[in-house]
Image (cartoon, helix red, strand yellow):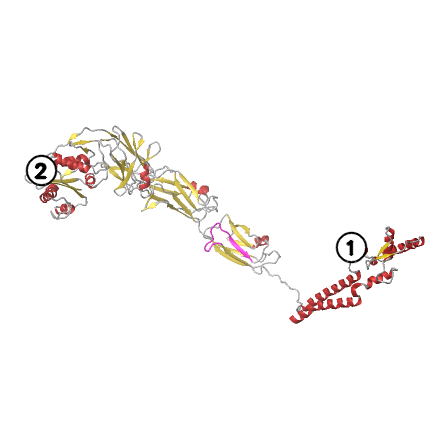
């Protein structure tokens, strides 16, 4: 096949070469036709003769007596013309014009200035014919080279009408919800009116027909809804036709069971260990869509009647009973608006708390989860009941399809205790003589450190007090250490707002504050006491030092003169006085002071008295508690001046809150033993215990 195609492609080229060669043989140089034309028009037989028309044109134009030869280009001299010659010239001119009109191919274009001689018209025609023949041969060769195709003639297709088929299904895997349609599916687009006429359902119920865009699927929607827990039988007769008029070949029958009535459940959103937060919301979740107005009209919350306040705190009754007050039984009661007490109804106060209710679908078409939030925070340590009343008759609660709702169980919750302020130090209404007194607040529970610290503020005559805030005792005590001293005569106000929050996220129910004054107390002389004995030779010095230490501990400041001043530099809060423990002094402190003085040692970790550290020595004598501490010193004498120098040394650790100062101001201690001894040197031992 490839060789045939190549041969066919070569045919046009061969034909063109042969036709061109034949033409050149018949008409060499293309002059034969031109010579024939000149002869036919009456010219000379020589190819060098000049046409008469050219001669006439030269004479007419007033030539110079010369005639230009067209072919040779030479000048030929001629004699002047006579009158007879003029007439002959005119006649020749007329014939020449006639010849020009009859055969335009005899015009010699070379005689016209500015024009080049053109190829003879006859030769051009022959070449065009040769090119046309070549094109025809090319087309023939291409057609010849195409592969042969077999044409098979088949009969036209035939069609047969297929009747529609039908099936039935629901959009639910189980029972059909009361407001969901039952679907019929056909294999072809159906005539809707014929289907409607062919459908029957038992038990009878009103139906709405909702078709898809192709008229192949129809949903049988109940009007208003299916009866709950009912089996329905649907039959589609053979009169149901498709859009071409073909009916169902057989009737179809299907059945389904409708679902139950819509139910709901109430829950609280913030629950910790069975108690709810006073700031909780409540959620009501339904199995099918319900309208927002229905929930707003039927949902309510009321508080169980609380017990009468005990020490200013109300509580929920336990098994309907309240704690006795001064031996007298107490009963729950309700305080309505205006402070009027009313009797509870079924243990609950008649007042209904206002609620904000929103659904999970803003369009209110398919809301199934509703959130109810009380307008105000619930009272702590109280019981509340949230109910959804079903109503009756025309006021019955229904779902979006109009079906009655199932009864919903009420929800009872008890709120947890909200955090509260127990006390401030210095206490509200008190007077302090410490111009550097730290200010602390104690809460009932562990607090969120960040939010509560921000809610705690202190002012000095209305000006905010700056300083550092620190937490202690499991984040129950917050202390502010002022950056600068208070002014004498200032009024200090400490405040905690309701922004304070517990570690579990509950806010305080009320703000709390305390106000105290800063004053100057006259310096008082610290006196010693107690007599010396053979076993306690410097007992009076021990008692005197105890008095100095209690001056510092209770917020005073020991001066070099031995007075207790109210002008202080404290960086830790004042504490209660320590008691002088005779047992610790006799058994632990004094023997250890004697041992250090005898051996000229000063260390907490000497092997003496049943141990090598303060706690071991205390425990060896029966004081094994977890709160303990020890200060030791080496004054220059056992006199009052020596004791004063010890306390001033300890006080001056206020800036770093170092160990000696911290032991003196530690609130965990309740007693201390003091031992003073002088032998080879003077030593003092103070052992703290709580």
Q: CA distance from mark 2 to mark 1?
A: 155 Å
Residue 36 screen position, x and y as percent: 84, 63
Relative side of 305 to 141, left or right: left
Mark closest to the chain's N terminus, 2 or 1: 1
Figure label count = 2
> What secondary structure do most residues of the magenta stretch adopt?
loop
Q: Quadrant of residue 590?
A: top left
**Can the viewer see residue 305?**
no
Q: Is residue 459 magenta?
A: no
Residue tagged 1? 115
Residue 15 screen position, x and y as percent: 73, 68
Residue 634 screen position, x and y as percent: 13, 40
The span shown in magenta is: 171-186
**Can the viewer see residue 163?**
yes
Helix or strand or loop: what does disc 1 sit on? loop
Residue tagged 2? 538
Q: In the rendered view of the protein, which quadrant contains the C terminus? A: top left
Say if 318 sits above or below 57 in the image: above
Helix or strand or loop: what does disc 2 sit on? loop
Residue 155 screen position, x and y as percent: 66, 66
Q: Residue furthest left?
A: 534
How many C-alpha atoms fall within 10 Å of the one at disc 2: few (<14), some, or many (≥20)?
Answer: many
Identify which residue, 468 or 448, lies in the foreground: 468
Q: Is residue 178 magenta?
A: yes
Identify which residue, 569 or 507, lies in the foreground: 569
């Amino acid at each position: 096949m490839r060789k045939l195609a190549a041969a066919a492609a070569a045919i046009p080229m061969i034909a063109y070469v042969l036709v061109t060669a034949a033409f050149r043989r018949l008409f060499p140089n293309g002059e034969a036709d031109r010579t024939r034309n000149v002869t036919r028009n009456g010219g000379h037989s020589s190819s060098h003769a000049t046409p008469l028309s050219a001669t006439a044109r030269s004479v007419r134009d007033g030539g110079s007596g010369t005639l230009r030869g067209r072919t040779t280009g030479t000048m030929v001299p001629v004699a002047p013309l006579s009158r007879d010659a003029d007439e002959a010239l005119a006649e020749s001119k007329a014939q020449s014009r006639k010849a020009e009109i009859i055969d335009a191919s005899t015009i010699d274009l070379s005689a016209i200035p500015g024009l080049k001689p053109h190829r003879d018209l006859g030769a051009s025609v022959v070449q065009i014919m040769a090119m046309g023949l070549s094109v025809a041969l090319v087309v023939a060769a291409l057609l010849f080279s195409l592969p042969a195709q077999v044409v098979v003639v088949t009969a036209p297709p035939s069609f047969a009408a297929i009747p529609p088929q039908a099936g039935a299904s629901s959009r639910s895997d189980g029972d059909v919800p009361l407001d969901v349609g039952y679907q019929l599916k056909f294999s072809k687009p159906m005539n809707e009116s014929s289907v409607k006429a062919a459908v029957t359902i038992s038990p009878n119920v009103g139906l709405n027909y909702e078709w898809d865009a192709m008229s192949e699927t129809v949903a049988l929607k109940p009007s208003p809804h299916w009866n709950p827990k009912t089996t329905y039988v649907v039959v589609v007769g053979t009169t149901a036709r498709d859009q071409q008029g073909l009916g169902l070949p057989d009737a179809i029958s299907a059945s389904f069971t409708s679902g139950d009535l819509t139910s709901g459940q109430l829950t609280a959103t913030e629950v910790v260990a069975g108690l709810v937060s006073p700031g909780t919301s409540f959620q009501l979740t339904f199995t099918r869509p319900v309208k927002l107005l229905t929930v707003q009209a039927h949902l309510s919350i009321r508080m169980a009647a609380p017990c009468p306040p005990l020490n200013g705190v109300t509580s929920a009754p336990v098994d309907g009973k309240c704690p006795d007050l001064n031996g007298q039984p107490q009963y729950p009661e309700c305080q309505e608006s205006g402070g009027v007490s009313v009797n509870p109804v079924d243990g609950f106060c008649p007042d209904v708390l206002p609620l904000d209710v929103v659904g999970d679908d803003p369009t209110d078409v398919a809301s199934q989860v509703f959130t109810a939030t009380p307008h105000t925070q619930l009272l702590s340590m109280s019981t509340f009941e949230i109910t959804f009343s079903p109503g009756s008759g025309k006021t019955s609660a229904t779902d979006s399809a109009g079906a009655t709702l199932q009864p919903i169980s009420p929800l009872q919750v008890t709120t947890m205790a909200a955090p509260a302020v127990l006390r401030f130090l210095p206490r509200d209404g008190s007077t302090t003589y410490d111009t550097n007194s730290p200010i602390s607040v104690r809460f009932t529970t562990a607090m969120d450190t960040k939010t509560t610290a921000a809610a705690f503020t202190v002012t000095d005559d209305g000006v905010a007090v700056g300083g550092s805030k620190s937490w202690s005792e499991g984040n129950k005590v917050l202390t502010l250490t002022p950056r600068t001293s208070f002014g004498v005569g200032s009024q200090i106000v400490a405040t905690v707002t309701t922004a304070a929050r517990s570690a579990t996220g509950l806010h305080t129910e009320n703000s709390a504050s305390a106000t105290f004054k800063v004053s100057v107390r006259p310096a008082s002389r610290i006196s010693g006491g107690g007599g010396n004995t053979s076993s306690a030779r410097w007992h009076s010095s021990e008692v005197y030092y105890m008095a100095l230490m209690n001056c510092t501990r209770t917020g005073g400041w020991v001066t070099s003169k031995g007075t207790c001043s109210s002008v202080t530099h404290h960086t830790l809060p004042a504490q209660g006085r320590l008691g002088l423990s005779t047992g610790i002094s006799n058994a632990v402190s004094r023997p250890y002071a004697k041992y250090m003085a005898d051996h000229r040692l000063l260390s907490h970790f000497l092997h003496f008295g049943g141990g090598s550290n303060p706690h071991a020595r205390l425990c060896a004598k029966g004081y094994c508690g977890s709160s303990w501490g020890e200060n030791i010193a080496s004054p220059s004498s056992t006199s009052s001046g020596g004791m004063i120098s010890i306390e001033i040394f300890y006080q001056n650790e206020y800036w770093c809150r170092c160990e000696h100062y911290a032991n003196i101001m530690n609130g965990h201690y309740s007693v201390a033993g003091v031992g003073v001894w002088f032998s080879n040197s003077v030593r003092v031992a103070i052992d703290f215990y709580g």
